[in-house]
Image: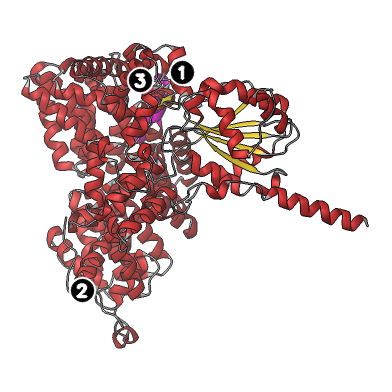
Amino acid sequence: MQTWINSIRLYGWCCLAMASNLEQVDQATRFVGRETELNEITQLLENTDCRLLTLVGVGGIGKTRLAVQLAKGQQQAFLHGIWFVNLQPLQSGKQIVSAVVDVLGVVLSGHDTPENQLLQYLHDKNLLLLLDNFEHVLDGVEFVTQIIQRAPAAKLLVTSREALSLPEEWLYPIEGLPFPLDYQTDKAESMTAVELFVERARQVYPNFSLADHQDSVVRICQLVGGIPLALELAASWTKTLRCSEIAAEIQHSLNFLSSNLRHVPERHRSMPAVFAQTWEHLTEREQALFKRLAVFKGGFQREAAEAIAGASLPLLSSLLDKSLLRHEAGGRYQIHELLRQYANGKLNEAEIEALTETHCRYYCDFLAQREPGLVEREQVKNSLAIEAELENIRAAWQVALDRRQLDALRKVTAPYFHFCQMQSRYLEYVDASGLAADSLEGAGDLPGLAQVLVFRGWMLIRIGRFEQAAAGLERSKALFEDFRLTPVHGMGSHPLAPLTVLAVIRGDYAYAVALGQQLKREMAGGLDKQNLGFACYGLTSAYLNLGDYAAALKNGAEALNLMTETGNHWMSAYCHIELGNVQQALGRYREAERHYRDSLRIRQDYKDPEGIAVAAKHLGEISLLQHDYEAARQLYEQSLAIYQKLNDQGGLAAAHHGLGQVAYQAGAADLAAHHFQKALDIADRINFIPLLLSVLIDIGALMLTHDLKNRGAELLRLVQNHPGSNQQQQKKAAALLNKNSTLADAPSPDLETTLVALRTELLDFVPVSPAAKASPLIEPLTERELEVLHLIAQGLSNPAIAAQLIISVGTVKAHTNRIFGKLGATNRVEAVNKAQELSLLGDKPFPKN
């Protein structure tokens, strides 16, 4: 009997749980993504304390779709069902009762009010009411409170652009779908914003291929911030426009995001129409502030909003409640880019002019005020503060350039340089400072130009443009002398500092000593300990290469003490590297490793990728010297990956050189030749003489052990006799030659002729096996695939290949995947090695870029 009763109860429960009107809600397309949100909201609904849960977000963000999808998975959890109530058509909160009554099918009778009759009906019901678009009827929130108080088993799931602001309310903000950032393009296909765009695009253009349009699709997703409605509207244009054109149109005008599809409700047929509904519900003061906030790029702090837009905390809170702003944990406010475009469209020309000027002045001052902290003491704190405001700072810099505000440019040139230097933003500063230099020179401000050229020279050295750096720095040096200029306070702000480092890179160590000593004399006895420290730093490297280890240690210790004394911990990491290099040359590997690890620790504190790569490379050298080849390989690969992202040419060459040394020691001659070839190409292209000579020594050693002894000896003698070789290189070359003393003497060849010949020699270094010759590819590579393969062999990244061949990155990836498939390779190194075995690269030597 009890089993029968339980069965009846279970049957009744199931029948009641099936009570719902969710199937009547129009869901014309497949629901995409939101797994994280679904899980988190489900957990909130299961919390007995959560009776009123509001999904709050801007129009078009997908609140309704998410709520309905969630509700469909909860139907077994509510005995009396889940009921969707569309509040959008209502004109007043007084109509909420009627809307709920109609959905539930409650029969009203008698003299009691409809509200009381409905509440009496709900009193013992275990159900979920899904109240959609509540922002239209916020004057009816009191009825929500009544339900919570008088229907203890009922729960309410609300969607709204504005919080209900009730004590019982639990808020869950809805953001856009995840989309790839610039460094995540390889993960684009797995991001749900991209997935949604592609799916909707294929509804209007069945042959749409992500591989052919990936870069532009990613850009579209970024521009709309993952807002589902905006993605769907953008995708509807793929039947008539290329994705690159769609991205350009979105960037140009928000009005582009519109659609005439019949199934789309009128209020959702354009993003301006969606936002207009929210705009109309704002007070005049809220509208005035909201449109002024459009001047900000990438968010803002409350202090900036007060100073630039005249914001008050109550008004900011009100816009926050209406989903027009987001408040982050660190105190920053964010405004969605599409909302910012909409607000900007509400400004007139006079308002734009005044706001832009105030914004520029504020952020130039903001940057200038942080200059002392960037150079000394609180470097990490100030660097992070600037990073948070970087979009606003870039906008202010551009305004100062456009309006030729020379005072502003002079004021921010140094702190902008220090920030970009610490964060490895070399190309950004090269481009920005180039424009500043043009403006200053055009205005006849030669002293200002002289200082900009110093900072720009440092960054040009960073990216391997040594000739360009030298020209600018020599001009700066002449201007400093002509005008008897004093460098601004800061790191390496005197032209002699980067010129000393450049002389070391070129292998002119005596000239480097002369420049370093001149800078040291000029700075001695003064208050500029930063440039004095840079003089000692440059001299450390120069003396090391000359073999004067005592002088190198003395200057290195002096540089480290000066940087520590001034609180310039970022630069002290470089001093540790140079001291480690001296200790390594002296054979004191434990001391060298200690300095390298101290440098790495500092760089990690600063989150400085270039500094981390430098330390990793040098730690790889120590592992190699201690015969720990696996550790060395991992460190060099870590370094290589960072340098590839930074496009640091000197670093790339050094990392490839290290990987070649590891492969040589492991007996992998083909892989060693592959990495040496890459290192040689880059070092030659940027004229990095010391590194070039080091690579030649190792290629010579490789040839000595592979029946190419005479050629190997020629390379070693070339290094011995080259004026740019340092003492360590000469000793290493001599030691290798002494081991092979039976080799006949031969005149050392010319460097340039040797480099040209080596390109072919290294490609043919490993003989093609008979098996490889007898096994041609089943499916030959196309002409375009061969072009891509040669550029891969040069070490070019996908974006660099795309730029050279004038195709998209997505197309490069597609070609690369086909190349891997045809060659039976799983990565670039395997593909190049297989291509060498099949003589696919021999007919077309690597071109010099």
* Residue indicated by mark 1: 318
Does 792 sit above or below residue 134?
below
* Residue indicated by mark 3: 290
| Residue 62 in magenta stretch | no
The reply to whether residue 581 is in sight is no
Amino acid type of the residue that numbered disc 3 sits on in the rendered structure = Phe
**Chain part drawn in magenta:** 552-572
Mark 2 residue crowding within 10 angstroms, few (<14) / some (14–19) / many (20+): some
Q: Secondary structure at mark 1?
A: helix
Image quadrant occupied by the N terminus: bottom right
Q: Are marks 2 and 1 in contact (CB under 8 Å)?
A: no
Q: Identify the image quadrant of residue 483.
A: top left
Amino acid type of the residue that numbered disc 2 sits on in the rendered structure = Gly
User: In the image, residue 125 lies at what x, y percent?
Assistant: 73, 37
Does 209 sit above or below residue 380?
below
Nearer the N terminus, badge 2 or badge 1? Answer: 1
